[in-house]
Structure formats: structure tokens, C-alpha cells
Amino acid sequence: QAAAFAPAPRGVRKVVVSTNLAETSLTLPGVVYVVDCLHVKQRAYNPLLGLESLLIAPVSKASAMQRAGRAGRVRAGKCFRLCTETDYEGLPDATVPEMQRSDLTGMVLQLKALGIDNIMRFEWLAPPPAETMVRALEGLHALGVLDHDAKLTREVGMPLAEMPLEPHLGRCLLSSAAAGCSLEAATVA
């Protein structure tokens, strides 16, 4: 990674292959050309299956403009997009917020720990799908984190909210002490 920041020797062209991390996180000096494939790997959660996966998806126009902005910081630059103009016009204007495409079980647990009881009426900046919220509440209830009034339980909910783990892994650790397999559970977690 450090080699990306080092200047290229005279007469040598430096080529950097990067992920969407380079859209906003860093600026490499001397970048003149950007070749953009207009795709990104992003997390997506399927509440019906309960699975989170990394999918290849088209970028938004906002991301494409950000990528193009990497070229020409020091001198005039150029961005080459690997698509037709029609395909580019078909891209969404903005990226779907991560809140709307992620598993919210851990987030709901933390909000409950902060004393926010009515999660469904919470004022989100980018409201997540209702089905994702319902799945998160159902998952926490199944783990024994929430009681019938959707409040954190004293035995499981409170200790689990203090663990820096996903709820299902934290529940595994809490249960492992009673089963006498804490070392094995800690290895898995």
C-alpha cells in the first residue's frame, strides 16, 4: 500500500488498481488518468434469507463523479468510463444508504440499550425497510434478548448489549459459560 504513495521513477508510468475505497478515503498525488469500470462491491442484506452478502453492483452517478475527481488533482486529467453513454445515463443518481441494505440486529440492540423502546417510530435519516426492522426484532426475541414487551432482558439482553460482537455470536459466548465450553466459543466468535 505504501508503494502507491511513492513517486514513480522518471519515464515510468504508475498504474494503481483500486477499489471503491479510493473514491473518498485518500488522494494519490500525480494521478492523471482514471479508468472506471462503474461497478462496486457492496454489502446487501436479504431479510427473507437472513443473509448478508457482498454483491457486485453498478455505481451511482454520484460515485462515478467522485471517482472521476481522482484524476487531475495536480494537473489536467481524464476519466475513462467503461460503458456507453446510455448505460451511464441509466445509473441511479445516488447510492442506496447502507442503513437500507444492512442487517440491523446489532443496531436495534444498541438502540434498545440506549433506552429507545419504540424502534419502529424512531426518526432515521434514511429509514430502513420495515421488514428488516421486524426481522431484527424477531431475531433478538429468538435469542432471548427481548422479553414479550420488547424490552431488554436482564439476564441476556443487558450483558449482550455491552459486548462488541454481533448479537448471535455474543449469545453464543454467554451460553458457552453454562455449557463449559467458553474457550471453544471464544475461538468461534
Image (tube, helix red, strand yellow):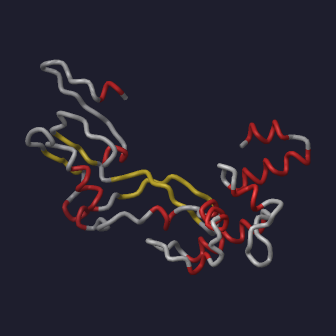
Query: From the viewer's perspective, is residue 107 above or below residue 67?
Result: below
Instruction: State the image coordinates of residue 88 (x, y, percent, origin top left).
Output: 24, 62
Q: Quadrant of the C terminus?
A: top right
Query: On the picture, is 113 further left or further right than 67?
Result: right
Query: On the picture, is 131 further left or further right than 101?
Result: right
Instruction: State the image coordinates of residue 8 (x, y, percent, origin top left).
Output: 20, 23
Query: From the viewer's perspective, is residue 38 above or below residue 115?
Result: above
Q: Front-most of 126 and 62?
A: 126
Query: From the viewer's perspective, is residue 182 above or below residue 62?
Result: above
* Residue at the image position 68 percent from the left and 71 percent from the top: 137
Q: Residue furthest front?
A: 115
* Residue at the image position 69 percent from the left and 57 percent from the top: 161
The image quadrant of residue 149 is: bottom right
Q: Front-most of 137 and 58?
A: 137
Instruction: State the image coordinates of residue 66 (x, y, percent, origin top left).
Output: 25, 53
Q: Residue furthest right?
A: 179
Q: Residue furthest bottom?
A: 121
The image quadrant of residue 3 is: top left
Q: Front-most of 56 and 133?
A: 133
Q: Quadrant of the N terminus?
A: top left
